Amino acid sequence: MPNAGSAEPARRREGARWPVLLGLLVVCYAVAALGALATGDSGETYRALDRPAWAPPGWLFGPVWTVLYGTIAVAAWLVLRNPRGSTRAAMTWWWVQLLLNLAWSPLFFAAGEYGLAFLDICLLLAAVVVTIVLFARHRRAAGLLLVPYALWVAFASALNLAIWVSNT
């Protein structure tokens, strides 16, 4: 039987945090699934576009986004797991970037609104940068986990702009 000074209660509290990570992963991958549902056959649309020579092949987006959505969830979990003060601002921006992320695919693929999609992705990039700064105040690793996401969104912004210019 553990005594009051044992590590057992700390282990139980630590274990109770795993459902939070699972919930964050579900939210992030639900955003991915909703975006995919809203876009229909995005692969066909992407292939039909006039793209720059440096555009990646369509098959690359799925694996990249799968990893990125995982890191987005883990970064939020790290902030919530050991917060340094209130997490309200950091998590508000996390939700903002996730909603902007969700909006991009339907704007670009389903609506063919490349200009509005470009505006959305620029706002997304700004929101990701703010989220990185706020997350890093709580946990440096949480901010660093979002850096590849910011770099990918920056690249995707340039690609979105190039496609918008070439296809209007």
Image: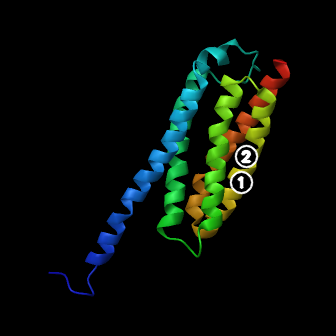
Q: Residues within 10 Å of mark 2 (few under 14, many from 20)?
A: many
Residue 43 placement (x, y as % from top left): 59, 18
Q: Find numbered disc 1 in the image and state the secondary structure of the residue it sits on.
A: helix
Residue 139 placement (x, y as % from top left): 57, 66
* Residue 89 horizontal side relative to residue 120, left or right: left
Marks 1,2: beta carbons within 8 A? yes
Q: Amino acid at mark 1?
A: Val
Residue in front for this viewpoint, 36 or 79:
36
What's the image's color scheme?
A: rainbow
The residue that appears at 57% across and 21% down in the rendered structure is: 40
Q: Find numbered disc 2 in the image and state the secondary structure of the residue it sits on.
A: helix
The residue that appears at 71% across and 24% down in the rendered structure is: 111
Q: Residues within 10 Å of mark 1 (few under 14, many from 20)?
A: many
- The circle on residue 129 is 1
Q: CA distance from mark 1 to mark 2?
A: 6 Å
Residue in front for this viewpoint, 95 or 150:
95
On screen, 131 above or below 156? below
Looking at the rendered image, the quarter that the C terminus falls into is: top right
* Residue 162 horizontal side relative to residue 110, left or right: right
- The circle on residue 125 is 2
- The circle on residue 18 is none
Number of labels in the image equals 2
Residue 158 placement (x, y as % from top left): 78, 33
Residue 47 placement (x, y as % from top left): 66, 14
On screen, 132 above or below 9? above
